[in-house]
Image (tube, rainbow, N blue to C red):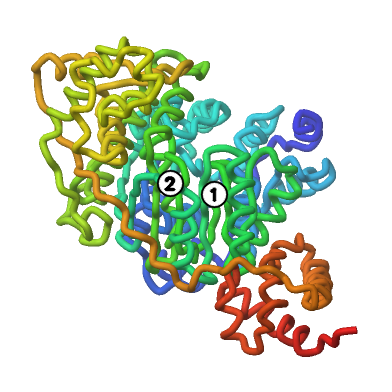
């Protein structure tokens, strides 16, 4: 325990960790080139580094992929003393330490995976001046007597990474981060650098006040990620939309976010069944499984990680080409952080979010059902409403995002879905009033499906029994198809005109809706456009009935699959499903191109397994 070994070994004098590469005698540009191998700073990096080198506190908000870590790493090399870096995740700390060591810089991390002897050894290195960087979680830093022991050392800088975790109003609050205000009290002369990619104005103000005592510089580098194309789609068949989307990224890395653990598992299975290498990641998996899946994702090409929000913070994977949200994120901050994991290398990337009425209801229920204070709930609801406005935007989505974070708007990007296919906006007041009247006249005790049935004039037994076929508005909305009414209700929900009872799912009219219903104000909606029919890359698989004579070949192919699966330590279905092997046995393809005509066989699987199965088909001899 920290309390034991810090008490025993902490010296009473300060030491001076050595300066690798004699950085103090070099210029910033020389260190940048000779230590890190870069010829020039990116925008904002030099200013951030110089602020910390001068001894000032700094809050730096820089977009993902802008090189935040280099700012404080190069600054620490230019200052005397050891840099203590507070980071929220073990994987992130390990990656940073490995990167620094690869550049010849002495760095280590103390975390829960280390033995007591390993921790003592690392501490001795720090005391002897052999460490330039020590990475710690906030829990480790604040545990026992470590913080007090550090006051006897020559600490040159504190760095708080993912600093938005400090804010109790933010999207990713970590209570332990809240206690980091002790740093400025115990080390008043040591600069603190706070870094994050996601912080709206209230979050920035809270970080400045709580962590830095309103004493320091704030640098907002910007939030624009022009290399990422942003798309939002109405969810109508989420699994089909997922498969259509990932088909555009054959052999490339991606992340698919889901709201629940069960959905993560089901989605990963769906992708595997359709020829992709997909791995699940959520807090319910054993830690060793999560770690193994993360390592596979980081080290192998063509892997899709299907995850809850438990995955991603600090993951330094530059070539992620897409991020897809199967469910609505919790806020604009969460969305920006998660979609920002695509295209860190600056190359083209895509972000797709599916969005539907039930998404809104679930998110609002989660907020209302939490144990948070009323003030916190109001804050979370405001953040969710901002995300809904983003989803319903009729103009450039990139500018909606920039405006939310207080960044300078630009000309329409021409790259997001609303720029590429501008939606038609119409005066939806009449439609909204008709829907609201039926909600009110039916007693505000029915859900969306029933109200839509009333609008289109459905003649169900439930409607007749309730006498709702005699309501004034019954059937008056039959000029709109059901999907169009679903879009209207989704936008009414997003606009705050209606709410959903969390227990029974019945629609309730909110105050703005009541005002609109009774003649005050107007509302605009984005016109519903039916999704185009899916263009299939290959023909639809025919139903295969395996002839009796082909059964032995089918069993032989299963043996080949079993050996491949055993060699890769994966379930057999990850290689090919039985339906695929049945088609192989029935059609007996002879060329690699022939395999692509089989449903569930993509180019990557042909490349990986095609030769093995063609050889097996050629070698098989019936008994």
Q: Sequence-wise, which precedes: disc 2 or disc 1?
A: 1
351 w.r.t. 169: above or below: below
> How far across and down, in percent of the image, does residue 331 sit?
39, 35
Residue farthest to the top, as pictured? 443
Residue at the (54%, 71%) spot, across then down: 251
Label 1 sits on a secondary structure element that is loop
Q: Residue at x 41, y 17 (%)?
A: 501
In the displayed structure, does residue 508 sit left or right of residue 418?
Answer: right
Q: Where is 623 relative to 64, above or below?
A: below
Quadrant of the rendered image containing residue 114? top right
Cα–Cα gap, marks 2 and 1: 9 Å
Relative to the observer, which residue lies in front, 13 or 524? 524
Q: Dot 2: within a 10 Å radius of its alpha carbon, few (fewer than 14), some, or many (20 or more) residues?
A: many
Is residue 90 among the parts visible in the rendering? yes
- 232 lies above or below 404: below
Q: Please, is residue 611 above or below residue 237 in the view?
A: below
Q: Where in the figure is residue 376, as x and y percent of width and height?
A: 41, 19
Given residues 168 and 385, the one toward you in this image is 385
Report which residue position mark 1 lands on.
312
Say which element carries label 2: helix
Residue picked out by circle 2: 337
Q: Position of residue 585 (x, y in %)?
A: 72, 77
Contact, mark 2 vs mark 1 (Cβ under 8 Å): yes
Q: Quadrant of the N terminus?
A: top right
């Amino acid at each position: 325990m920290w309390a034991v070994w810090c008490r025993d070994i902490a010296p009473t004098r300060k030491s001076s960790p050595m300066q690798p590469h004699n950085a103090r005698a070099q210029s910033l540009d020389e260190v940048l080139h000779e230590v890190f191998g870069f010829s020039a700073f990116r925008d904002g990096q030099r200013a951030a580094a110089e602020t910390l080198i001068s001894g000032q506190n700094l809050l730096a908000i820089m977009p993902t992929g802008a090189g935040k870590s280099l700012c404080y790493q190069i600054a620490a090399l230019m200052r005397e003393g050891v840099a203590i870096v507070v980071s929220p995740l073990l994987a992130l700390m390990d990656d940073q330490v490995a990167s620094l060591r690869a550049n010849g810089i002495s760095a280590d991390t103390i975390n829960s995976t280390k033995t007591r002897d390993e921790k003592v050894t690392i501490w001795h290195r720090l005391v002897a001046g052999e460490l330039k960087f020590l990475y710690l979680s906030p829990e480790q830093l604040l545990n026992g007597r470590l913080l007090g022991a550090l006051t006897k050392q020559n600490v040159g800088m504190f760095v708080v990474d993912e600093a938005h975790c400090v804010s109790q109003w933010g999207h990713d609050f970590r209570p332990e981060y809240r206690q980091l205000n002790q740093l400025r009290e115990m080390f008043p002369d040591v600069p603190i650098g706070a870094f994050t990619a996601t912080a709206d104005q209230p979050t920035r103000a809270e970080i400045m006040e709580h962590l830095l005592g309103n004493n320091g510089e704030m640098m907002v580098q910007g939030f624009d990620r022009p290399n990422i194309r942003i798309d939002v789609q109405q969810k109508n068949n989420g699994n089909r939309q997922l498969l259509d989307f990932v088909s555009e990224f054959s052999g490339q890395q991606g992340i698919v976010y889901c709201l629940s653990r069960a959905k993560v598992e089901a989605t990963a299975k769906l992708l595997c069944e359709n020829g992709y290498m997909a791995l699940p990641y959520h807090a319910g998996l054993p830690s060793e499984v999560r770690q193994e899946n993360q390592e596979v994702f980081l080290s192998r090409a063509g892997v899709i990680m299907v995850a809850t929000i438990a995955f991603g913070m600090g993951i330094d994977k530059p070539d992620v080409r897409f991020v897809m949200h199967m469910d609505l994120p919790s806020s604009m901050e969460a969305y920006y952080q998660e979609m920002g994991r695509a295209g860190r290398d600056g190359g083209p990337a895509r972000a797709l979010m599916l969005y539907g009425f039930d998404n809104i209801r679930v998110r609002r229920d989660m907020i209302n059902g939490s144990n948070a204070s009323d003030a916190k709930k109001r804050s979370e609801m405001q953040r969710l409403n901002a995300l809904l406005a983003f989803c319903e935007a009729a103009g450039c989505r990139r500018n909606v995002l920039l405006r939310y974070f207080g960044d300078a708007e630009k000309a329409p990007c021409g790259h997001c879905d609303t720029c590429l296919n501008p939606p038609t906006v119409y005066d939806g007041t009449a439609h909204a009033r008709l829907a609201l009247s039926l909600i009110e006249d039916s007693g505000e005790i029915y859900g969306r499906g029933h109200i839509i049935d009333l609008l289109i004039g459905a003649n169900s037994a439930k409607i007749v029994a309730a006498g709702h076929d005699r309501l004034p508005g019954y059937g008056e909305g039959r000029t709109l198809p059901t999907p169009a009414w679903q879009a209207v209700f989704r936008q009414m929900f997003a606009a705050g005109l209606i709410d959903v009872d969390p227990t029974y799912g019945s629609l309730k009219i909110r105050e703005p809706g009541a005002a609109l219903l009774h003649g005050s104000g107007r509302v605009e909606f984005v016109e519903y456009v039916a999704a185009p029919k899916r263009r299939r890359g290959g023909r639809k698989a025919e139903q295969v009935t395996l002839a009796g004579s082909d059964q032995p070949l089918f069993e032989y192919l299963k043996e080949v699959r079993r050996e491949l699966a055993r060699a890769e330590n994966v379930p057999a279905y990850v290689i090919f499903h039985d339906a695929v092997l049945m088609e192989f046995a029935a059609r007996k393809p002879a060329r690699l191109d022939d395999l692509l005509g089989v449903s569930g066989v993509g180019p990557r699987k042909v490349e990986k397994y095609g030769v093995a199965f063609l050889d097996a088909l050629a070698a098989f001899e019936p008994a």
